[in-house]
Amino acid sequence: MEIKITVASKMAVIKTLSALIALSFLYGCESPEQQAKERTETMKQLAISATKHLLDRNPATISESDNTFRMQELTPEAVAKLSKQNVIPNAGLDIIKEKSLAEDEKRKNVVEVTSADAMVPIDRAVTPFKISGKNIIKIEGKPDRIAPFSLTMNVKLTPEMQGYPRITDVTGLTHEDVYGMPEPKSTKEAKGKKRHGH
């Protein structure tokens, strides 16, 4: 059976394709304000999620949180830098120690982010976000300590990243932010002696 394509049918196909193309452009052309709003929200949500993963010290979830933070939320350069600065525990042995210690102390924590705001216009490739909140430490399920925190995360989002931002740096994080208590005296004294010797 021979199928003949008439001029009319060709025109119908062209009109249909033209309409589909026009619709795709219509929905794809958001206003600059709408694009800026979506960009801000995308970066903000990453900053909030990354903060929760960074401060998570629950035995049941610390491994998963650390893995997500390192592999999906941080740039490789940031992983190397933050590991060297001891802002994040070294993958593997340190995580096992953290998990074991928390289990022994029957300790868990809840991270509540109360604000996450861009510090500069979000049209830049890298935007610092100021994140504040509280780290609630629980022992045997009961609140034991509350450590307020305030830190800065640099969030990178470029057109080449196709809407998937990454954290390039974290600053302002203290030992108390992570553990709900000051750094142990022995560590401070050791550092002090080292500095004194220089």
Image (cartoon, grey):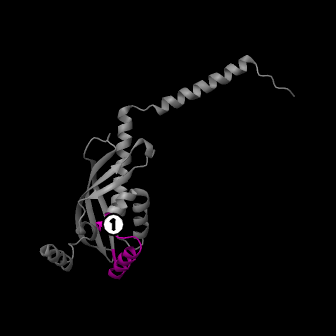
Residue 1 higher or lower than 123, as above or below: above
Which residue bears the numbered disc 1?
83
- Residue at left offset 40%, top offset 49%: 165
Quadrant of image for the C terminus: bottom left
At x 40%, y 62%, the residue is 70
Look at the image and tell me whether residue 87 can be seen.
no
**Residue situated furthest bottom in the rendering:** 104
The location of residue 17, given as percent across then percent down, is: 62, 27
Q: Position of residue 44 (x, y in %)?
A: 34, 49
Query: Percent x, y for residue 195?
Result: 15, 72
Residue 44 lies in magenta, yes or no? no
Rate crowding at label 1 as few (under 14), some (14 to 19) or many (20 or more) other CA atoms within 10 Å: few
Q: Nearer the viewer, residue 36 or 93?
A: 93
Which quadrant of the figure has residue 67?
bottom left
From what the image shows, is residue 27 above or below residue 151? above
Quadrant housing the N terminus: top right
**Three-letter code for the amino acid on which mark 1 is drawn:** Ser
Asked where in the image residue 146 lies, by quadrant, the reply is bottom left
Q: Secondary structure at mark 1?
A: helix
Q: Is residue 84 magenta?
A: yes
Is residue 6 visible in this depiction of the protein? yes
- Residue in the picture at 39% in, 37% down: 35
Residue at the right extreme? 1
Q: Is residue 51 left or right of residue 194?
A: right
The number of discs equals: 1
What is the chief secondary structure element of the magenta stretch?
helix
Dividing the picture into quadrants, the one containing residue 32 is top left
The answer to whether 82 is drawn above or below residue 58 in the figure is above
Residue 9 position, x and y percent, is 72, 21
Where does the magenta region start and end? 82-107
Query: Which residue is the extreme one toward the front?
Result: 198
